[in-house]
Image (cartoon, helix red, strand yellow):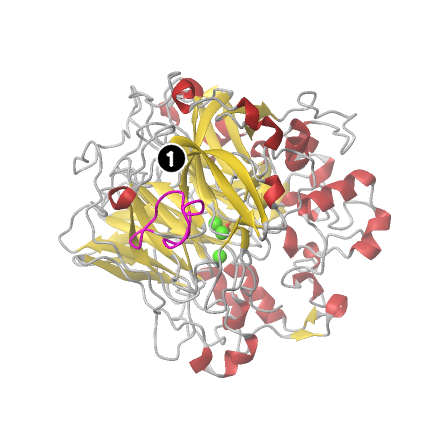
Amino acid sequence: MTAKTHNEIAAIDPDDIGHNSSPNPSFNDLIASRLSRRHLFGLGVGTAGAALLQACGGGGSGSGGGFPVLPAAPAPAPAPAPAPAPAAPKLGFTAVAKSLDDVVSVPPGYTASVLYRLGDPIAAGVPAYANDGTDAPATYDKRAGDHHDGMTFFGINASNKWDPANASRGLLAMNHEAITPLFLHPTGQTIVGTGNAAVRSVADEVQREFFLHGVSVIEVNKGASSWSYKQDSSFNRRVHTLTEMTFSGPAANTDYLKTKFSTDGSKTRGTLNNCANGTTPWGTYLTCEENWAGYFRRITATDNPSRSAKELAAFTRYGVAGTGRELWSTVTPDTADNIYGRWNAQVTGATATDDYRNGANTYGWVVEIDPFTPGSTPKKRTALGRMGHEGACLGPVVAGKPLVWYMGDDSRNEYIYKFVSTKAWDAADINGGLAAGDKYMDDGKLYVAKFNADGTGVWLELKLGVNGITASNPAYAFGDAADVVINVRLAADAAGATKMDRPEWTAVNPKTGEVYVTLTNTNAASRPITATDAANPRFYNDPKGVAATAQTGNPNGHIVRFADDGADPTALSFKWDVYLFGARATASADINLSGLVADNDFSSPDGLWFSSVTSGLLWLETDDGAYTDVTNCMLLGAVPGKVGDGAAKTITNVDGATTRTQATFVGKAPGTDGLRRFLVGPKDCEITGIAESGDGRALFVNIQHPGETTAAANIANPALFGSHWPEGGNARPRSATVVITKNDGGLIGL
Ligand code: FEO
Ligand code: CA
Ligand code: CA
Ligand code: CA
């Protein structure tokens, strides 16, 4: 396989191709029903009250002192934040200029230090990473993985229990989404043959790659002057593609999940393409499987004749077809337990327990990991549905109320979901580990969002027998509850969900309970000018580089936000607007709808996370290929307002000679007081993953795949590598976690 290429606007994640051919809206025909914002937002939306507490990313669990104020919470009660956060955070740093340099730039008065790089050893006796492709493959399950992504800081106390407020010691759990194969072996991947006949001929290389995906848990400590990870901590752990996991929830132990490895459908091996993350209020980590479909080999010409109509519909909807992204299934000879052959999702045996025809059903889940119990077996929580899971953001946590997770499915034209637990939250479950997960995450209701043109929206339940999810559905005959969660995209199609411009991270404002979702970008093929809608309203050209290469569709992305009605996260209706539109500062007014300027313009929002300590401070990360003629990817700090703080607006979209108007709702322009660039990363990277120490005085940020577009032919000439970060010189680039501190020891961003 070749290194990834940025050959068109949304090609940063080459797997994020759309597979949604459903006729769902796009509801241009509903525009006439639009109401005024004044009317809509005079209906009790906005202030959420003191009961709305904590959320997401690092928040609800790990990331710090801002853990929910849980009424009558027993020990270990979360401690208050050491430093009182201002009622309304105010950005207090100097904006960082856009940059194409191969460095991490932060504002004056801040220091960014490299903490944890690809290949760094996490067990005693494992040698330092040579970073030339010669490190012993068997050591990689004790090394940092590649492509660092979503992460959470779990403060830990002297009794080795979860202490969200801990300012100097914690477990950092982080995802390793994928790999840049070129830099992992002496001269990149060794592949013999081409097309369907291409095979990986060096098993050692594949072993490295198996271990480099997944999750790290590492102990980190603040020293006298800097943070470091503890190489020999007993908490250190890698979860990767060979780690055994069990299924729970509606799909567990069903025929859909039976394989040669698990003849009763109770378990599988591994997790991969772990993108964004999530947390629980009991102190565990959620890792989310995003672009898993492409890793499986399924040659349609040979496999389709062996498949049922339903199976074929499911494969088409999820994009399970091809040779397999890294050709893992092609290594011969296979092992007795099929560590290579399990990536072949074709019918090869007599029954489903003789092969891995159901292998693709065992991926696409939210996976719960207990970082405090290194030997525990992760659980795939099937009640949250199978999709291209970006993340799972915990909503407001209130004792006696259900728990809610908001989730994006990141492919073009996919949907936004939420899961509502059946059980009401009981703070006695703090530190309850995976048993608490069994209680809250295996039983509940799953919904998908429909955004109406009038600024309202509804949550449509995804359950057998409702919203068209029946055996008589013409597109897919749903059989049972397991079928619904395994094929939840098809269920959401049937329900009539709204196609979005690639839903990435979700973030919940701890001050209001309002939910923000990054819609990173899309292209003209997936959303032509005739298919814009109120919540995905723009079509434009963003010319790139001196050649002014056309980038049409919505190449810069936007961020939608919504408030569940009554400030109740279990509500079945909501109000929404568009918080921010990505754009070049120089773009025209109908493109640069948020009035971005040189100090805060950005493209392709992806990571999104509210600080727990500096409550209300939002961090926004980019994964861009559109504005990269001008700047590398970045991190911005923001202080958002609330749903409805802007105005209704009708914009004019342009596609060549065609113009078309589109009504939408635009949030109040942020200005530089509301949005400011905080960090710019090295060449060819994505900025993703973010967490904070319990006192908000250390911010952990991941630099993913610097130099990822380096051409394979350049491996012999280090001078031509796209990046040498972080080591510099002629070194191969490495994904890495950086820790950012303020030189005066203050709160980050203020
Ligand atoms: Fe892995 Fe949707 O970014
Ligand atoms: Ca992402
Ligand atoms: Ca992305
Ligand atoms: Ca990436």
- Residue drawn at x 65%, y 38% is 266
Quadrant, the C terminus: top left
Instruction: Decide which of 356, 634 is in the foreground and name it.
Output: 634
- Looking at the image, how many numbered discs can be counted on the residues? 1
Quadrant, the N terminus: bottom right
Question: Residue 665, relative to residue 227: is it above or below?
Answer: above
Q: In x, y percent, where is residue 325?
A: 64, 60
Ligand 3 lies under 8 Å from the Cβ of mark 1: no
Q: Is residue 693 magenta?
A: no
Q: In x, y percent, where is residue 541?
A: 52, 54
Residue 297 relative to residue 225: left or right: right
Q: Please indicate, yes or no, whether residue 19 appears anywhere in the rendered image.
A: yes
**Predominant SS of the magenta segment:** loop
Instruction: Decide which of 62, 333 is in the foreground and name it.
Output: 62
Residue 324 relative to residue 354: left or right: left
Question: Residue 700, relative to residue 574: is it above or below?
Answer: below
Magenta extent: 582-600
10 Å crowding of disc 1: few (<14), some (14-19), many (20+): many
Q: In x, y percent, where is residue 405?
A: 47, 32
Q: In x, y percent, where is residue 154?
A: 33, 43
| Type of amino acid under label 1 | Gly
Q: Name the residue carrying label 1.
A: 667
- Residue drawn at x 34%, y 72% is 727
The quadrant holding residue 2 is bottom right
Instruction: Decide which of 633, 126 is in the foreground and name it.
Output: 633
Question: Residue 632, relative to residue 603: is it above or below?
Answer: below
